[in-house]
Image (cartoon, grey):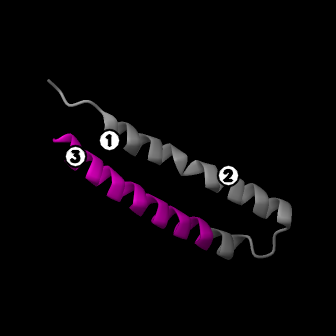
Amino acid sequence: MPVRLRKLIGTVLLIALVIVYAWLATMVAVAQLAESGPVVHFTYFLLTGLLWILPAMGIIKWMVKQPKA
């Protein structure tokens, strides 16, 4: 697969990941954390704010992978 095409696909996947992940994290927070205190909210959003990095790292590694010779 050409590098430019891989980077285009990876960019679209990253944008979709961020949108879907943010929507899901917010929906879970609204549904489950409505009665919780500020410390629980802070902890939840801190963890979910960092957790999206794991799948993004996989996508970025795939994007920059060198093509086979």
Expressed as whole percent of the image width and height from the top left, the position of residue 43 reads: 76, 55
Q: Are marks 2 and 1 in contact (CB under 8 Å)?
A: no
Q: Which residue is mark 1?
A: 63
Q: Measure how far apart labels 2 and 1 are at the Cα level.
A: 25 Å
Residue at the spot 53% in from the left edge and 70% down from the top edge: 23
Residue at the spot 66% in from the left edge and 75% down from the top edge: 31
Neighbour tally class for label 3: few under 14, some 14-19, many 20 plus, Cα within 10 Å: few
Q: In this picture, which residue range is highlighted in magenta? A: 1-27
Q: Measure how far apart labels 3 and 2 are at the Cα level.
A: 33 Å
55 in the magenta segment: no
Q: Which residue is mark 2?
A: 47
Identified by mark 1, the residue type is: Met
Left-right relation of 51 to 34: left
Q: Which residue is mark 3?
A: 4
Q: Measure how far apart labels 1 and 3 are at the Cα level.
A: 9 Å
User: Residue 63 occupies which quadrant of the picture?
Assistant: top left
- What is the magenta segment's predominant secondary structure? helix
Left-right relation of 43 to 63: right
Neighbour tally class for label 2: few under 14, some 14-19, many 20 plus, Cα within 10 Å: few
Residue at the spot 81% in from the left edge and 75% down from the top edge: 35
| Quarter of the figure with the C terminus | top left
Q: Is residue 45 above or below residue 36?
A: above
Q: Can you name the residue that lies furthest to the top here?
A: 69
Q: Secondary structure at mark 3?
A: helix
Camera-nearest label, 2 or 1: 1
